[in-house]
Image (tube, helix red, strand yellow):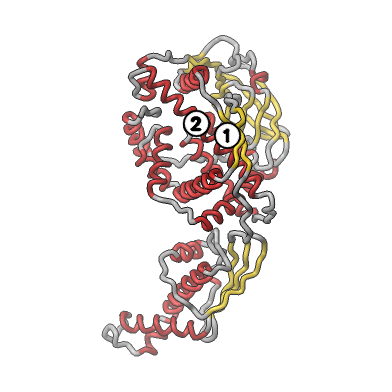
Amino acid sequence: MAESENIQADLNETDAVKLDMQADIKEVSSCQRHVKVTVAADEVAKYYNREVDDFCEKAIVPGFRVGKAPRKVIEKKFKNEIKDRIKQGLLLDSLAQVNDSEDIVPISEPELDVRSVVVPDEGPFVYEYDIEVRPVFDVPNWKGLKINRPTREFNDADIDNAIEILRNNNGVLVETDEPAKVGDYIVTKLTFSREGKTISSADSETIRIRPTLSFHDGAIEGFDKLMKGVRPGDVRTTKVKLTENTPNKELSGKEIDAEFVISAVKVLELPEVNEDFIYEVGGFESMGDFRDAVLDVLKRQLDHEQRQQARTQIADALTAGANWELPPALLERQSRRELQRAILELRRSGFSEGQIASQINYLRQNSQAQTAKALKEHFILEKIADNENVTDEQIDYDTEIALIAAQSNQSPRRVRSQLEKAGEMDILRNQIIERKVIDLILAEAKFKDVPYEMKSEKDEALDRAAGSDEVETDIPEVTEEEAKEAAREAANEPQMKKD
């Protein structure tokens, strides 16, 4: 597969060469094709002569000056090297020609065992491979869709609630001897087991007591009631039903035991909202500027909710007739990309890390159905973009990165570096294109305003799976030096910025 990926990576750098060849493309499923490529013998001979001529000109052969060795000697001595170069050239040029045809739009690297491909001594060059492609479909009518749009005029109470969340994010945990109540924190040893056998565990987790405790692959409802009144030394047990998407496939859909051994109870001491606080969180010098900035975040979150609800309604309408069969491997790969896209969207819209973690756990628990719908939606939006000549520009990337940086306590340069390091710039590109197409659809839509209800934080989210000790994080790891540099930048780049 490594050689196959190298071949595919080189395609973008290969000048188009029109070959005398045939590509027999068979539909395996809506998104899968089996391709048999046959390059004419005359073409193979051309590539052979070109490579031999090159070796004759440059090869070093003992007993001969460079460029003076007989052709027969070169052909015999460098037979394998010549064939390797012929194979590489023929594969690159023929794959590029297939990809450029209107018969196939690849969405992944070809599944091609390069080592099994043989250049014949005579006759045509033949090889076969499987590839995932964009399905063929007619674009559904996207003009004049009826969309419910949540709206709200934010008032002082809404701003006060948002400031309370900000205070919580900047509070300090202090141990208490009092029994735990809703909103307090427990420090606990956490163990998940089935039939007495430990599945996963954590020696120490700090968890806020809220109505629901969610994981990547499940949730505990009534967590606040389970933990009501606990003290250090107490033990609480309950059941957790895992989702179908748990990393441990043997436990998909099954119920496991959860045990909490409480080692401490902590309360959150909140900072006073004064001049020192507003300067620390954003460099504000007046309470008016601070509240205006909080209002701006609320408006961005409302804009995010409007877009998400509109997108959901658009997806429902556009994918209603999209009964394509999606390969499991494609869904599995796309699932992580969908999570990464959601994280980028939430961060640019000013949501807290706790709110993001809760939403991401929900998406993980429903990943297969969500991913299938999102992938179909992506194909349709991408085709609309092609038809309407929707493209991405540098200013789009600068804007997106600036919005993410403003909420992540980092500089735009640091955010861009992390995205590039994690290989997520193509995800950002898709996000930009899809947003532009959504805007195009919304410009033609008919709206009905409906009330927007502010969402309360009812979930506590843990970044772990109950059914597995394998930790999968959506945040790229950074080195110690990078962390120090980010901290230095953070000191000069406050999280909430005033205009």
Q: Residue at x 51, y 34 (%)?
A: 303
Which numbered marker is on residue 351?
A: 2
The reply to whether callout 2 and callout 1 are in contact (CB within 8 Å) is yes
From the top left corner, tell me how far across and down residue 300 is, in percent: 48, 32
From the top left corner, tell me how far across and down residue 280 is, in percent: 36, 21
Is residue 279 or residue 54 the one in the foreground?
Answer: 279
Q: Quick check: 36 left or right of 405? A: right
- Based on the displayed image, in which of its 4 quarters is residue 486 positioned? top left
Residue 304 seen in render: yes
Q: How many marks?
A: 2
What separation in Å lies between label 2 and label 1 (alpha carbons)? 10 Å
Q: Quick check: 278 left or right of 381? A: left
From the top left corner, tell me how far across and down residue 477 is, in percent: 44, 41
Q: Residues within 10 Å of mark 2 (few under 14, many from 20)?
A: many
Tell which tag, 2 or 1, sits nearer the viewer.
2
Q: Secondary structure at mark 2?
A: loop
**Disc 2 marks which amino acid?**
Phe
Is residue 146 or residue 284 the one in the foreground?
Answer: 146
Which numbered marker is on residue 285?
A: none
Q: Residues within 10 Å of mark 1 (few under 14, many from 20)?
A: some
Q: Is residue 275 above or below residue 429?
A: above
Q: Is residue 201 above or below residue 92?
A: above
- Based on the displayed image, in which of its 4 quarters is residue 134 positioned? bottom right
Does label 2 or label 1 sit earlier along the sequence? 2
Q: Is residue 129 above or below residue 403?
A: below
From the top left corner, tell me how far across and down residue 363 is, in percent: 60, 39
| Residue highlighted by disc 1 | 359
Is residue 162 or residue 55 the one in the foreground?
Answer: 162
- Based on the displayed image, in which of its 4 quarters is residue 236 positioned? top right
Q: Secondary structure at mark 1?
A: helix
Quadrant (top left/top right/bottom left/bottom right) for the C terminus: top left
